[in-house]
Amino acid sequence: MFLHTVFFWLKPGLTPAEMAEFEASLATLTTIPTVRFKYIGKPAATSRPVIDSSYSYKLVVGFDDLAGHDVYQEIDTHLAFIAQCSRYWTKVQVYDAEELK
């Protein structure tokens, strides 16, 4: 399995309508056909020195392999999300991982 983890830091002061648009658009990414695993969340209410909860949203999507991830990157749904919602964030950080075999 190939996991694609994305952290979003949203701009302060977004309206409820803008937040709703971001959340709805983010959810569309989980409908891409090559996605096998999906998770969308916000920082948990935990507090330890090793925890970074400075982000606003987290997306994790899993694929069978790198090829599935590559399809995801180029599909219209993903490109539309970036075009529509990039105005809402100040930072995006991506971590990709492949399963140990």
Image (cartoon, rainbow, N blue to C red):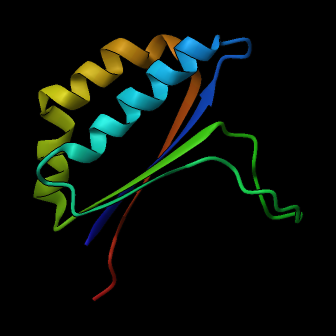
Which quadrant of the figure has residue 21? top left
Residue 87, x across and y down, in percent: 49, 10
> Which residue is located at x 24 percent, y 31 percent?
78
> Which residue is located at x 31 percent, y 24 percent?
81
Q: Residue furthest bottom?
A: 101
Q: Nearer the viewer, residue 15 or 61?
A: 15
> Which residue is located at x 75 percent, y 48 percent?
53
Q: Nearer the viewer, residue 90 or 25?
A: 25
Residue 100, x across and y down, in percent: 33, 84
Q: Is residue 4 left or right of residue 40?
A: left
Residue 94, x across and y down, in percent: 46, 45
Image quarter hosting the C terminus? bottom left
Image quarter hosting the N terminus? bottom left
Q: Is residue 76 left or right of residue 51?
A: left
> Which residue is located at x 15 percent, y 46 percent?
70
Residue 93, x across and y down, in percent: 53, 40
The number of numbered discs placed on residues in the rendered structure image is: 0
Q: Is residue 24 above or below residue 17?
A: below
Which quadrant of the figure has residue 31? top left
Q: Nearer the viewer, residue 23 or 90?
A: 23
Q: Is residue 69 left or right of residue 9?
A: left
